[in-house]
Image (tube, rainbow, N blue to C red):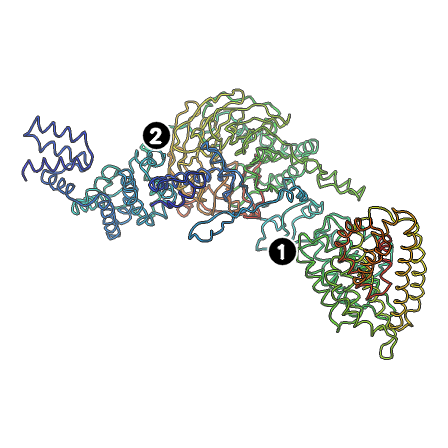
Amino acid sequence: MEEEEIEKLVTAYLKKRGFKDAELAFQEELHRHPKNASASAGAAAAAGGSGALSDPDVAKLVQLFSESKSVPEQYHDGYGRLRSWAHDSLDLYKHELLRVLYPVFIHCFMDLIAQGHLHEARIFFNSFRDDHAMMHSGDLLKLEGVLSPSHLEEMEFAHYLRNTKATIKICQYSYELLLQYLHKTQSFTMLGIINERINFQVSPGQPTSLSDDVGVETIFTTDDATKINPKEIQWGLLEDSLEDRFEKGAFSPLEADKGEGEAKEAEQDDNKKRSGEGKQGNAIKKSKKDKAAAAAVKNSRTEANTVSTAPRVKAELTLPVMSTEVEQSILEDLRNRVQLSSTALPSVSFYTFVNTHNGLNCSTISQDGSLVAGGFSDSSLKVWDMAKLGQQSAVLQGENDMNNGEHAGPLGGRRSYSLYQGHSGPIHAVTFSPLGDFILSSSADSTVRLWSTKLNANLVCYKGHNYPVWDVQFSPVGHYFASASHDRTARVWSMDRIQPLRIMAGHLSDVDCVQWHPNCNYIATGSSDKTVRLWDVASGECLRIFVGHRSVILSLAISPDGRYMASGDEDGTIMVWDLSSGRCITPLMGHASCVWTLGYSCEGTLLASGSADCSVRLWDVTTSTKTPRNEEKSGSTGRLRSLKTLLTKSTPVYTLQFSRRNLLFAAGALSKGA
Amino acid sequence: MSIVPKETIEVIAQSIGIGNLSPDAALALAPDVEYRMREMMQEAIKCMRHSRRTVLTVDDVDGALSLKNVEPVYGFAFGGPLKFKHAIGYKDLFYVDDKDVDLKDVIEAPLPKAPLDTSVHCHWLAIEGVQPAIPENAPVQVLAAPVEGKKQDQKDDGLPIDIKLPIRHVLSRELQLYFEKITELTLRNPESALFKEALVSLATDSGLHPLVPYFTCFIADEVSRGLSDIPLLFAVMRVVQSLFHNPHVNVEPYLHQLMPAVVTCLVAKRLGKRLSDNHWELRDFVATLVASICKRYARTYSTLQSRLTKQLVNSFLNPKHVLPTHYGAIQGLAALGPNMVRLLILPNVEQYLKLLEPEMLLGVQTSKIKRFEAWRVYGALLRACGQCVYDRLKVLPPFPSTPPGPLWKCNARVVTPLSRKHKLNGDHLEQQSPSKRMAIDDSVTSPPIDSITDNNNAPGEATASTALCNASKIPENSGEATTSTDATGKEEVKENGFVASVRVSAIHRQIWKDDLDSGRLLISLFEMFGESILPFIPSPEMSIFL
């Protein structure tokens, strides 16, 4: 081929593709080094999308571009052919090759949009969307609305896709098959996209098996995840914690005897104290139950405790000092704790909100179960004291007996709860301080408010977020709390400052939920960008990115030994992660709808989950989260399993929590429509 | 290319006052509209998720709009899905059916019931991993014995728990005992003072709701079994009455089971064993009971009254039914109020009386009992019609000036002998043949009219004002007396020669016209029943009538 012809073709190509600068440069270059033209043509073609190709190839390619069909057709046909080729390929390599299709599909669509072929883009999208509807329906829904180049600019998701390379693990042979195909068919559009947008991790040997396909969704991850995740984290528990001391005390032989006696005393004390305090109803039920089990547990306690085996770390934050009285009561709780396992399931006490008129947005239960709080869409926060509730109805019954004619309502027209008003938007999250003396509420009015349950009054209003605050959580030691907001940040606060101590920015979409690590050095956040991140509170750094969920993450829980984390999403999937490796141990499937809440039992053997499908599920998380100590067992139980499904009566479960004695509290609003 | 057609954009543009939107602009706007809509929905779904809901509401969309700093759409509230209507003449144009609401109606409407306040209830979802079979839990496959009496006790407090009872619920021992005691009392000694106490308890106790289905069953059983036992039926009906009185018990779901039993007691062919049994009284009692039930549940159970009246009218109009049944039907309808009587009885009275009259005759073919029954029915019918008339007349506007003394006096004079005569007649009615009775009626009715005209003439000379007043009344009187005598009344006025009266009568004619209907009604009734209808007419109107 004549050099001049090539020059002409190159100029025509550059014009057509709209590379004005490149064209100018090319012209200049031509004038300056007329001899060297072919080399520069190669360079320009490289910019066009195809890499190291030999000279005649370039000519062919350039020719192809200049004379070929219209751009949209290229995309449509090219993708169509790639697709049918992938589907017809050898079964062994098929699933790997099919993985390539999705990123190519998305980028074809976005390319078409970006070039202004809107109508064709829509046709393209609709003709191939069904292939991916099962795996990526959420993404498709989002992309479907993109109808102009400006939308691409504006939309965070599209932006993200454009700026990140898809990572696909593929075996050597599949990779070669793909390249061979692309070259043979001269589908340079596809080749361009694959080169530009996909990052292949080519592994030698056999292709990965289908069952390990969990990683399919993780195609679009930032490189950050791989960069960040190797960082070291100290997932151990706080040294010198109360539990620690308790364990040590219980194990020394002298103390053990004393402990027996003490326990009995404690039980009596317990009764006295409780009746003295007037904690009725629930508390008494609870203590009964717990007592019965306590004796049995005493013996089994000698077994190794997961919590005790966890390494100890130093606290990075200054922790509030605990009064001795509180310490005593916690120790008592620990003594009376029921040992739970896959064979000893917990008792569940359920609080049902009735007559909420669809207004209950969130609820929470205090550590001992005596207080229940509900945040409503009418900006009010209501707190029920279960002990008082019992008394009131008792008193009223007495009244009823005395004079039959008077039929005031069951609560005599008085409110059965204390009402906190102050927010100016729907309340989205409520949390009790560990001792139950404070409540935090976060609202759509972008503030977090601190309330005192003793004074029944608002103490502080924390302003900092710019958009609705979706979640707020007290730290396990109190004093500090974390909030998550629509403004894509999570913030860490202390009760005595009105400014946040740390701002955790990095999520690509709303931060939907937040949870503290038991050692208070880390917080975990779940986001609408389908990732969970772990942040260091002291430095504000992101330490881990957990990728794998297919939809919005709604709930988080971290195991009491600090090693594992569970996250629940909108589709009903729960994933259990190993914090140190950043890998998903196993997904737990079973819920049919949003998982609103998760909770670990105190010794970390059971995971409870509450969902919009009106059930509480209990999962056994001991079998595979524990390092296989019993070798004979570990062979069969690689995956975690569902132990029990407890159905409620058309009551979605909004919150659940294990008390220190391992009684499970759950709450939800009765909804007739459900 | 966008799912929003450009016509939609054009319609929206028109609705906000942009008439000349170019098609190109519409075409360019459509994709952006779609994108914005999707964006809004994405945000709204976030709001929905954070309100722990799985159903998107208007509030969520408002929340999303405020997130994007856009003014919310006013005028929409969560109250179920909006109804879109198809616009006639356009293929795919829909609009929200927005009805005009009269502000007056809104203001005058009674306040809706205050919603119940939110409350929290606690129960065991599981005990050591096992779900107890209590009403608060979803029904489980394995039905275990109730774990503790505690839960049921809580129910008895009458807390307004919205939890629907499960198909299988367990009655507490207390409630069982209570039920047994009440049923025993009802069956054994309904006369005792204890039974009265029991009725009071039934009407006031707040924890009885779980027993309602049992009572319903009991009542239906007893009525079908004990139709011959009047005291028992009375007792059972008293139980029904008490249950309906109880403000804490919602009988509505069981109405369809209860009503047949109650209506049976009203229109049954035979109640009681012996003829001497006073089933009339029972029917009267049940009639008022039925009416009160209808009144109470008219709003929640809209077809109740129509179904009931249908049944009653059927049994009233069916000549094959026995007279006691007719009696019950008439009483039932009468208890439902004068309007029901006017609508359902009055049009049929004339025909019915034709049927009834032979029964009332002292004939050979009819037994004494039959005749007694017939008179009973006649009485009930008379009462019903009379009440209806009374109700109509009562609402007549009062006359501008009180009738002068002389007129009153003479009225009184006329009326007293009349009523006395009526009494006399009543005593002898059984022996009199109807024709004779009618004759008496005629003889009784004609003189008073004469006397009034006489009286009218008499005070006419007294004072101008009284005369005026009288004159104005004459047309009404005559008009009400007989439609045809309208002219005579006027003639009389002319005869009297009071010119001024014409003006006043013109004003009053207006009122009179309005009341012509009731006047006619009264006349037709009068024709049918004779003067026995008269005691039902309130005295001032009576004076006019006479």
Question: Horizontally, is A266 left or right of A612 in the view?
Answer: right
Question: Horizontally, is A83 left or right of A452 in the view?
Answer: left
Chain assignment, label 1 = B
Please say whether residue B346 is visible from this viewpoint.
yes
Q: As rendered, which of B205 and A205 lies closer to the eye?
A: B205
Residue A640's x, y, as percent? 44, 44
Q: Which residue is mark 2?
A: A228
Say what secondary structure mark 1 lies in. loop
Question: Horizontally, is B519 left or right of A221 in the view?
Answer: right
Quadrant for the N terminus of chain B in the image: top left
Please say whether residue B233 is visible from this viewpoint.
no
Residue type, mark 2 in image: Ile
**Whether label 1 touches label 2, CB < 8 Å:** no
Determine the residue positioned at 43% across, 34% down: A526
Residue A645's x, y, as percent? 52, 48
* Mark 1 and mark 2: Cα distance apart in space: 57 Å
Say what secondary structure mark 2 lies in. helix
Question: Horizontally, is B4 left or right of A186 in the view?
Answer: right
Quick check: B456 above or below B429?
A: above
Residue A18, picture quadrant: top left
The label number, if any, that marks residue B167 in the structure image: 1
